Amino acid sequence: MRSKIPVVLPIVFAGAVLPALAQASGADMPPLVHDIGSSLLLAALLAVVFNRLQIPSIAAFLVAGVLAGPIGFHMVTDPANIETIAQLGLILLLFVIGLELDLRKILVSGRTIILTGLLQFPLCVLFGILMTKILIGLGVGTAVLGPQGPDGAGGYAPLYVGLILGASSTLLVVKLFQESFQMDTVAGRVSVGLLIFQDIWAIIVIAVQPNFSHPEPLPILLSFLGIGVLAIAAVVMAKYLLPVAFRWIAKVPELLLVAAIGWCFGLVFLGSGLDYLTERLLGFNLHLAVGAGMSALIAGTSIASLPYSTDVVGKVAIVKDFFVTLFFVALGMGIPLPNGLQVVGLALALSFLAVVARYLVFFPLFYWAGLDRRNALLSSTRLAQVSEFGLVITYAGLALGHITPELNTVVIFAFVLTALATPFLFKQADAIQQRLGPWLGRLGFKEPPSAKSDEETSYSVALLGFHRIASSLFHELGLRCPGLLSRTLVVDYNVGLHSRINDRGATVCYGDLRNPETLHHCGVDKAAVVVVAVPDDLLKGTRNRDIVKVVRHMAPDAAIIASAIELREVPRLYAAGADYVYLPRIDSAQAVLPAVLSGLDGRLPQYREEREARDGSWSQRSEVLD
């Protein structure tokens, strides 16, 4: 009983004390600050409790929104404040997605992604229409799914259900791939590639939606023309202007965040202002404006090839998580009270159909487009949720009179239900694949003779930081084990050294050692031996101990070598996960001791000659750092 008290008390505190405190303090601060603070306080408190109960944090944020919103304790004075701030999370998320997109890798899987991307959405729409017609024919939910339109006879509900089933949640899927360090796996790349196609389909739907009865192709073509114009402008600027700007600030990693987000919103403003520019330059409006989300995606993709992109991903991800939390809180505020059991039942049915569509549509398309059975099933399982774009589409459909308010509520509840199920499905995807594998084999979905590995390029050695010790170690590797250089990864932010390291055959990655995302995206998790090569007195904002913990988490089988300055730090490094700890002062003392003893014996000149004959003259060494 006592163990449950720490769990119960925060919930009681949230329900009974926080609303009064929030209302009492509301007059002492600006409404925007009050609303954001109230939302984050509730979200943080519930996230701790839910994590203790092993419930996904997304559920905590949604519940926080319900408690803070109009059907809860009215802690937020204006929900629009949170909704506005939350949109920043979506923009930054799409920017990070663009940064992580390696178009070359996607093109390698081009047949799989292109064929699946072109066919999946239309087939899901047809599946949704068919299933809705069957439900109506059975007399299920006719009041919600029956004919509804501007004149009461449009019958758009089946179409909207199909549109909802056709797209998955970019926000949820990418967040979980990032947290599990699986973004660069086959399933990760294919899933993100398909999500991009789904976003393009959503753009088409939104463009056609006001004219469902009489679709016009011209607005769609102009929308794609605007995307093309913005993409060309971004690529040109990213090729000729941004490298210079980033090079100026490369040695100040803190400025990369400001510069990267500035570039993101600069392109967002340019995309939204294309109509203004064409009207001023050409005298008429071509309606080329590009949405903020697509502009952010283009902004990220355009600089993904720069050497700074991996570090930018890590830095932006921290800020993005703050806003994404508010996104889910805002979504929770918008959850209405269900009008009856029929709405809840239809939400469950829609959630079930969303999962079924992944196995009946997504999986066969992935498989027949060339993906192996395992990755096809993993990708399908992890895409089994309703998209946030679905909320936008149904909200617009409600405003146009295409659907009933009850159907809009059903879609919101289906999004919430599938969002809560997504973390479980994501973790259990491998187990589901193993259980369904034999049955799928009988149906003709054979596993290839040798399954393709998810692993990308692996490294024998990873040097984290490149200072004096790392430079000498790198040189010794080249002398004694030259074959290792081509399988050596160096992570360091000093871009002035990168070309010299590359010239010797190693792979070098710009990165800030403080950020776990940076280390993962550079490929540290694929190294057999990881050397933290910079002592603590040269590191800024982190320690060898902290880096070792991160590396041990992402690379549990790697051999980790770390540096210590103080003797008392050695056991702490071993406890953090290091396999070997070296102290530069002790290694130096042990190296100098033979010279001291030779001097006492009167043999110091001979000792020097022996060392130079064996190792060469140190003044003749050609290291990256002199």
Image (spheres, rainbow, N blue to C red):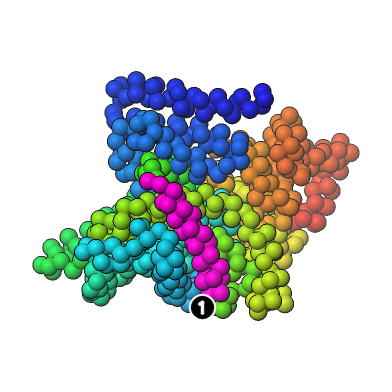
Of 20 and 91, nearer the camera is 20
Identified at 50% across, 31% down, the residue is 45
Q: Quadrant of the N terminus?
A: top right
Residue 357 is a magenta residue: yes
Mark 1 nearby-residue class (10 Å; few <14, some 14–19, many ≥20):
some
Residue identifier under label 1:
111
Q: Is residue 96 left or right of residue 548?
A: left
Task: Classify 544 as above or below 213.
Answer: above
Residue 246 in view: no
Residue 157, quarter of the rendered image: bottom left
Residue 151 in view: yes
Residue 223, quarter of the rendered image: bottom left
SS state under label 1: helix
Of 318 and 140, nearer the camera is 140
Q: Amino acid at mark 1?
A: Arg
Identified at 59% across, 29% down, the residue is 7
Q: Main secondary structure of the magenta part?
A: helix
Tell which residue pokes out farthest to the right in this image: 601
Of 79 and 607, nearer the camera is 79
Residue 128 is a magenta residue: no
Task: Classify 52 as above or below 335.
Answer: above
Rendering coords of residue 406 (x, y %): 35, 52
> Magenta region: which residues?
339-366
